[in-house]
Image (cartoon, grey):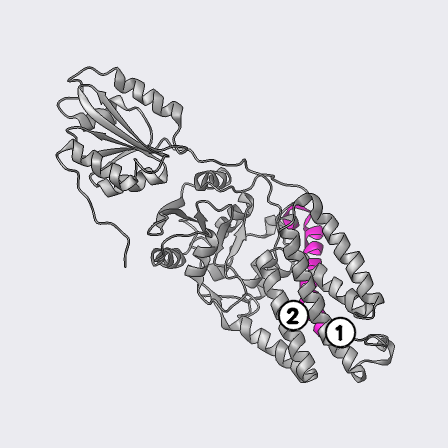
């Protein structure tokens, strides 16, 4: 059943309009919904607002101006005179729908109803509780900007415009959620972005039919991306305005959600999730080295444990000079079960660290790693080599730039380990093949997930593997079909 209310035109009776607004907003029930009865220029007026959303100084200033009006000064056309003469404010608009006015009040602006005027006035003198822009914890850099997105959509769009002063930068406003009325913004550079991708994303957002967006940008992602059984992220999250600006210049489309400090970057490939701003804050050679190390760490986090398990169980696969791989004594617990227990234990530790105050989280990690791990080894539950390779794989997981990709890689690692334990060499080969086919099978907004490797594009592969100097990076990704392919 749709919650969207029908249009409610203003009545010619001022008291009926005021009473309707009071009932719908619950003025007599909700302490923070405020109604002021006023009289200026010989006319009755009513102000509706939500306490905490209003800039008091601006509203007081406008009320002073209205208080100076004499009876008859608003005649013969009070709406025009208020809009153009006596309410000198930038963000002011009108509507002939009372339900629209209710939505405005609940979003933060103030609504003014004037006796004898057939439309209501919206005065957007709102403010939100907000923290200052800080460097994101997940995307830290040694050198670079220290500002990050916050939970207010207007601040986030301003941080982006500060870096993208292109006249064709578009910030299209949308309202999603039948009850939450969440503000959403679709951002793109009109002269660069492919209009088909832009329209596809906007159409996906318009089709969202739900009460609200309690989890902000994550709820939006699940609606517009689908494929709920796929653990791999089809969009990239960023809290850095400079990262968002870089993707705008490439031809991507950004989605801002009010109340969320993360911005969605669409569409993305697998390789977008392996890039980090730190690579572009260093010299190209150093950046290329950092990227190589990061790629190596990610591959190790996925394939090292299953491969080591395979060699440990099937030592005949090893050449003589690598015969030292694998434990001499497995211990009390089977080798595969040791891996599973430690993997689950690490996830428990990660969740415990999240829910633990910062002041004691470091101590918790040390106690778990040293005390529990050492005692488990001495008791014979775990083998030293198992702990070593798990630790190496964990480092690779933490080196993954995006948190969502690291969690998906962990599930892939466990699946590959299970197939290897179950079927041996065929299981490892089957698991690897299924993983490649899985990545090839899906797309992000019709963009192949493994591009430029599949389909193959040699020039684009160079940009993926190496950190190309910016003067030589003069072409935008062709997979995005940019209107202007040259930088």
The answer to which quarter of the image holds residue 30 is top left
Q: Nearer the viewer, residue 275 or 222?
A: 222
Which secondary structure lies at badge 2? helix
Where is residue 1? Give x, y as percent. 27, 59
Q: Residue furthest front?
A: 29
Which secondary structure lies at badge 1? helix
Look at the image and tell me whether residue 251 can be seen.
no
Which residue corresponds to the image point at 25% horizontal and 26% vertical from the top-left?
37
The answer to which quarter of the image holds residue 34 is top left
Q: Is residue 44 magenta?
A: no
The answer to which quarter of the image holds residue 126 is top left
Classify 10 Å Cα crowding around label 2: few (below 14), some (14-19), many (20 and above): many
As drawn, 465 above or below 39: below
> Which comes sooner in the sequence, label 2 or label 1?
1
Horizontal side, residue 310 vs residue 413: left or right: right
Query: Mark on residue 36?
Result: none
Q: How many marks?
A: 2
Which residue corresponds to the image point at 47% horizontal and 66% vertical from the top-left?
228
Where is residue 210? Give x, y as percent. 36, 56
Circle 1 residue: 308
Horizontal side, residue 53 vs residue 295: left or right: left
User: Given contact means CB atoms under 8 Å apart, are the residues at marks 2 and 1 in contact?
Assistant: no
Q: Nearer the viewer, residue 474 or 378?
A: 378
Look at the image and tell me whether residue 380 can be seen.
yes
Q: Is residue 294 magenta?
A: yes
Which residue corresponds to the image point at 74% horizontal and 71% vertical from the top-left?
338
Circle 2 residue: 413
Q: Nearer the viewer, residue 189 or 294?
A: 294
Q: Residues in magenta?
A: 279-306
């Amino acid at each position: 059943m749709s919650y969207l209310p029908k249009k409610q035109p203003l009545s010619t009776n001022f008291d009926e309009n005021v009473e309707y607004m009071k009932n719908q907003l619950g003025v007599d029930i909700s302490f923070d919904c405020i109604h002021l009865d006023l009289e200026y220029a010989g006319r009755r007026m009513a102000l509706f607002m939500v306490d905490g959303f209003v800039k008091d100084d601006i509203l007081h200033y406008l009320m002073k101006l209205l208080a100076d009006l004499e009876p008859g000064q608003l005649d013969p056309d009070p709406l025009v005179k208020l809009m153009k003469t006596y309410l000198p404010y930038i963000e002011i608009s009108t509507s002939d729908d009372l339900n629209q006015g209710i939505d405005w009040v609940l979003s933060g602006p103030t609504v003014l109803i004037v006796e004898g005027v057939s439309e209501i006035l919206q005065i957007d003198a709102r403010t939100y509780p907000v923290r200052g822009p800080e460097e994101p914890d997940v995307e830290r850099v040694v050198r670079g900007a220290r500002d990050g997105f916050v939970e207010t959509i207007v601040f986030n769009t301003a941080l982006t415009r500060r870096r993208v002063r292109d006249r064709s930068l578009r910030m299209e406003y949308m309202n999603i959620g039948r009850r939450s009325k969440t503000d959403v913004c679709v951002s793109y550079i009109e002269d660069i972005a492919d209009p088909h991708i832009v329209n596809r994303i906007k159409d996906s957002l318009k089709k969202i039919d739900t009460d609200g967006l309690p989890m902000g940008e994550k709820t939006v992602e699940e609606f517009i991306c689908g494929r709920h059984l796929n653990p791999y992220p089809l969009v990239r999250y960023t809290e850095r305005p400079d990262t968002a600006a870089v993707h705008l210049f490439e031809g991507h489309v950004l989605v801002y959600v009010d109340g969320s400090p993360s911005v969605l970057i669409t569409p993305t490939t697998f390789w977008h999730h392996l890039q980090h701003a730190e690579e572009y804050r260093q010299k190209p050679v150093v950046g290329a080295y950092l990227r190589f190390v990061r790629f190596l760490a990610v591959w190790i986090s996925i394939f090292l444990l299953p491969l080591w398990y395979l060699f440990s169980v099937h030592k005949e696969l090893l050449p003589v000079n690598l015969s030292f791989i694998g434990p001499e004594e497995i211990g009390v617990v089977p080798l595969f079960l040791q891996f599973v227990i430690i993997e689950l234990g690490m996830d428990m530790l990660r969740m415990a660290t999240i829910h633990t105050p910062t002041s004691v989280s470091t101590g918790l990690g040390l106690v778990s790693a040293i005390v529990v791990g050492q005692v488990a080894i001495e008791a014979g539950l775990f083998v030293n080599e198992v702990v070593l390779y798990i630790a190496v794989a964990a480092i690779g997981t933490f080196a993954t730039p995006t948190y969502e990709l690291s969690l998906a890689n962990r599930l892939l690692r466990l699946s590959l380990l299970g197939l290897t334990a179950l079927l041996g060499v065929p299981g490892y080969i089957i698991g690897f093949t299924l993983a490649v086919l899985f990545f090839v099978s899906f797309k992000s907004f019709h963009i192949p997930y493994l591009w430029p490797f599949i389909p193959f594009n040699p020039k684009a592969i160079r940009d993926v593997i190496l950190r190309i100097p910016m003067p030589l990076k003069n072409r935008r990704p062709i997979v995005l079909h940019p209107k202007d392919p040259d930088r």
